[in-house]
């Protein structure tokens, strides 16, 4: 029995093990799923915590609360920081962004150029008006050394001197056809220095114009006054007894007095034109009538010099939008110059014709002409091609300047060909 019972007992035990195997396997499988679930849950919690931290790093605080809801509660320190630190930092960064945007708007609206450099000489701030000094767009200049992107060696040298000495400086630079005042301020904090670039080109031009104007006016007034004084002194010193001398000197005095009156009148006219008061109200008028009125004023002078004065028009009515007084000043000056500078026996022809939507008026003479080098400047105030002859003719040097300003006020165009 013993020998025969061994195999039977072993088989029975094996059967019992086989019967219990599904239950153990199920328990093992359930345990494995639980472990996998717990690992996934931990990873999910950790991932939510990492997402919250990443949202803070990226400045996207709208996602912080969503990530906080799934964060790992077993990490209380991180949870506490996410709940307390995140919203405050978000508000701070939003405020910084608003301040940055506000600064960019202010810098962009400033007419002066602004450049800020750190202590290494690299560009930290640059606004659009300062762009003309740089060879690259603003975004490509930020963070680069000034000497590598600035087109002005003088500006680089000035900035380097201020960085080295740490003192406030003011200088004047000429660059790209302009004149600039440069103000530099040294700071202890970042950025290290700030450069303010102010374009004073127009101011310098106006100062030169004012200086030239005062000089020319003084000279033009002094010349006739000196002549009048000399003639009066001669008459007072005994010239009154000579009737022939009296008459000649009085005519000279009258000539220079008339010239003074014309000069003062032209100065007042030019001042009124430049202040925008030359044309009060434009109306539709007949240009031919204005030309004929101007012709009548110079008919006697032209006849005295045997000059043929002709008006050629395609029709007796050419309507324009203008102002009568301004047009008379234009044509009186142009026709008067043509008559005065044409030799005896010459001719002056004025033509008026419609050209597209405009009316073109040509004032042509066969006088002495104008040298080509003087043509670009003949509309300047007090500019004369032949100064001696102009004064002899009684000109003030302001006629063509008045013509140009009046033409521009009437939305027209004027040019000259010799």
Image (tube, grey):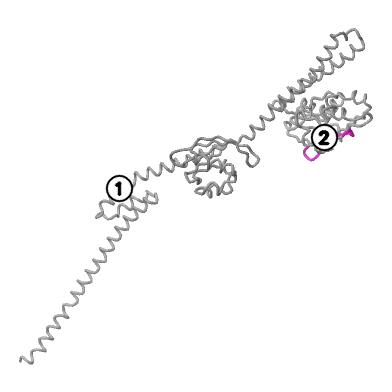
Mark 1, residue position: 83
Position above or below: 29 against 210: below
Is residue 358 rendered magenta in the image?
A: yes
Q: Position of residue 47 (x, y in %)?
A: 32, 58
Q: Which residues are magenta?
A: 354-368
Residue name at image x 5 percent, y 91 percent: 2
Residue contact at pointers 2 and 1, CB within 8 angstroms: no
Question: Which-is-in-front pick, marks 2 and 1?
Answer: 1
**Nearest to the observer: residue 186 or residue 293:** 186
The outermost residue toward the left is 1
Q: Secondary structure at mark 1?
A: helix
**2 or 1: tag closer to the N-terminus:** 1
User: Count of labels shown?
Assistant: 2
Q: Quadrant of the C terminus?
A: top right
Q: Determine whether, in the image, residue 131 is placed left or right of residue 191.
A: right
Q: What secondary structure characterizes most of the magenta part?
A: strand
Mark 2, residue position: 361
Q: Secondary structure at mark 2?
A: strand
**Mark 2 → mark 1, Cα distance in angstroms:** 83 Å
Q: Determine whether, in the image, residue 224 is placed left or right of residue 170.
A: right
Q: In which quadrant of the rendered view does residue 1 lie?
A: bottom left
Is residue 150 rendered magenta in the image?
A: no
Q: Position of residue 40 (x, y in %)?
A: 29, 63
Q: In which quadrant of the rendered view does residue 330 lie?
A: top right
User: Callout 2 environment at 10 Å: few (<14), some (14 to 19), or many (20+)?
Assistant: some
Position above or below: 38 against 8: above
Position above or below: 57 against 114: below
**Nearest to the observer: residue 183 or residue 92:** 183
Residue name at image x 32 percent, y 46 percent: 85
Q: Position of residue 96 (x, y in %)?
A: 42, 42
Q: Position of residue 214 (x, y in %)?
A: 71, 24
């Amino acid at each position: 029995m013993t020998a025969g019972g061994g195999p039977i007992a072993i088989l029975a035990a094996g059967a019992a093990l086989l019967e219990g195997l599904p239950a153990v396997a199920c328990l093992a499988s359930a345990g494995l799923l639980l472990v996998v679930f717990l690992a996934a849950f931990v990873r999910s919690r950790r991932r939510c915590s990492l997402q919250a931290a990443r949202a803070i790093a990226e400045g996207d605080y709208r996602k912080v609360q969503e990530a906080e809801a799934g964060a790992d509660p077993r990490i209380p320190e991180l949870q506490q920081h996410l709940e307390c630190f995140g919203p405050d930092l978000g508000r701070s960064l939003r405020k910084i962004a608003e301040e940055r945007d506000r600064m960019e708007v202010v810098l962009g609206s400033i007419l002066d150029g602004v450049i800020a450099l750190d202590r290494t000489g690299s560009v930290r701030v640059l606004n659009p008006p300062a762009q003309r000094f740089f060879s690259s767009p603003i975004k490509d200049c930020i963070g680069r050394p000034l000497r590598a992107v600035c087109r002005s060696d003088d500006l680089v040298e000035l900035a380097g001197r201020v960085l080295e000495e740490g003192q406030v400086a003011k200088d004047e630079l000429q660059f790209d056809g302009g004149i600039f005042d440069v103000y530099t301020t040294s700071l202890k904090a970042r950025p290290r220095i700030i450069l303010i670039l102010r374009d004073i080109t127009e101011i310098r031009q106006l100062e030169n114009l004012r200086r030239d104007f005062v000089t020319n006016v003084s000279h033009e007034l002094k010349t006739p006054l000196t002549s009048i004084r000399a003639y009066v002194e001669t008459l007072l010193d005994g010239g009154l007894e000579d009737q022939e001398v009296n008459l000649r000197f009085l005519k000279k005095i009258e000539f220079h007095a008339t010239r003074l009156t014309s000069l003062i009148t032209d100065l007042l006219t030019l001042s009124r034109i430049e202040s925008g008061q030359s044309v009060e109200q434009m109306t539709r008028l007949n240009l031919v009538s204005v030309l004929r009125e101007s012709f009548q004023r110079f008919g006697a002078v032209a006849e005295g010099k045997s000059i043929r004065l002709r008006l050629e028009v395609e029709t007796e009515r050419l309507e324009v939008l203008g102002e009568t007084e301004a047009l008379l000043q234009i044509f009186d000056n142009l026709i008067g110059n043509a008559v005065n500078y044409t030799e005896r026996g010459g001719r002056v022809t004025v033509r008026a014709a419609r050209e597209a939507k405009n009316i073109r008026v040509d004032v042509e003479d066969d006088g002495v002409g104008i040298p080509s080098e003087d043509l670009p400047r003949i509309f300047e105030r007090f500019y004369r091609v032949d100064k001696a002859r102009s004064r002899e003719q009684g000109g003030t040097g302001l006629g063509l300047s008045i013509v140009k300003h009046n033409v521009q006020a009437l939305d027209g165009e004027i040019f000259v060909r010799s």
